[in-house]
Amino acid sequence: MQSPTLADAVIIGAGPVGLFQVFELGLLDIKAHIIDSLPEVGGQCIELYPDKPIYDIPAIPVCSGRELINNLLKQIEPFKPQFYLGREVIRLEKQENGCFFIETSQAEQFLARTVFIAAGVGAFQPRLLNVDGIEDLVGRHVFYYVKHPEQFFNKKIVVCGGGDSALDWALHFADKAASVTLIHRRDDFKAAPQSITNMRELCAAGKIQLLIGQITGFAQQDDHLREITVTDIDGNTQILPVDDLLIFFGLSPKLGPIADWGLAIERKQVLVDTEKFQTSIPGIYAVGDINAYPGKKKLILSGFHEAALAAFAAAEYLNPEKPVQLQYTTTSPKLHQALGVKSPGFE
């Protein structure tokens, strides 16, 4: 067994807030290691909506989830973070010397002076379609998220669900797929009002078919999905031809091992203060959707703010005898050097 890697900071979660945490720590000369259970960086932005537009990132009128993650990765390049992807933190224990012993599911070990939990909603899993045998088609003809929209072009697709994701993708494919059918168990949708209006207009125009009911069966031929059975509330059934099935029943968040780390937790969220975004254990911080405090809003931009304050708090925690100076990337030669940019000549 190799000796544990010594680290000033370990970040758990490589979504947008976890990536920005790298940047804020880097500006304060704190190097970070990042661990994520997913096989690639980006968190929900990449797993759930890589190509959907995001409109509420300051100074960026619109960008996709993928573009946001790519820009964040470019922003943190000067700080050369080390990523550990496709592994889960299975153990986190505070040591007598104040460091935190961390072990991953791939047997990597760390001794971290500070820890930042940026795990989003935790280890999330999509809510599954409860039809016997359908799981054998997942990843081939049954999908719980869309990574490559072009693979569904000119296909007969069925979208299941009544929330934003279901309606967004049904609208997106209305002019790109051979046919689009939206299935929901009732004629009541929990989505943006404009999306509901647009969906109904496309239904009236014959570009989307809306069925009220649930999928109760399917048929395949030569290992390909061929048709599904839809049953309405009165027990009437309808057979529908289909190439691909997109399921958006929402996510079932699970804290996983985080629940066993001795942190104060309320409703599956880690409690923090609003000065340092520190948890109930000094030296451990929680930023982004995983944390909870009065007035919390689950927005990416809120997570960016939390990451900035958590970084300053960590700098003070790591060097309590050394005052932390607030410097500006516009004018600070020290930060310009850290970022690898040329300092302009200010008079």
Image (tube, grey):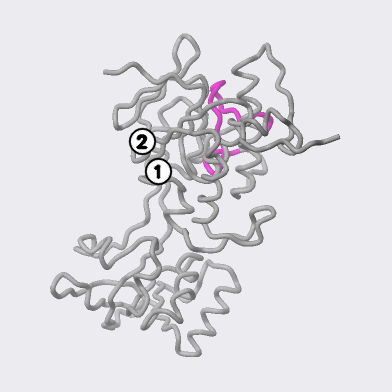
Task: Where is residue 132? Give x, y as percent.
Answer: 20, 63
Which quadrant of the figure contains the N terminus? top left
Furthest residue in direction right, as rendered: 347
Query: In the image, what residue occupies the spot 64% across and 25% down?
Result: 313
Label 1 to label 2, Cα distance in Å? 9 Å
Mark 1 lies on a secondary structure that is strand
Q: Which mark is residue 13?
A: none
Q: Is residue 213 left or right of residue 50?
A: left
Furthest residue in direction top, as rendered: 96
Kind of residue at badge 2: Glu
Disc nearer the start of the sequence (1/2)? 2
Q: Which residues are magenta?
A: 274-292
Which residue carries the number 1 mark?
123
From the viewer's side, name the closer residue of 255 and 8: 8
Q: Is residue 279 magenta?
A: yes
Discs 1, 2 touching: Cβ within 8 Å: yes
Task: Where is residue 91? Give x, y as percent.
Answer: 37, 26
Query: In the image, what residue occupies the spot 50% across and 69% down?
Result: 168
Furthest residue in direction bottom, as rendered: 205
Mark 2 lies on a secondary structure that is loop
Which residue carries the number 2 mark?
88
Q: Nearer the viewer, mark 1 or mark 2?
A: 2
**Residue 157: quadrant of the picture:** bottom left
Furthest residue in direction left, as rendered: 222
Task: Where is residue 89? Give x, y as percent.
Answer: 38, 32
Kind of residue at badge 1: Ala
Q: Is residue 127 left or right of residue 7?
A: left
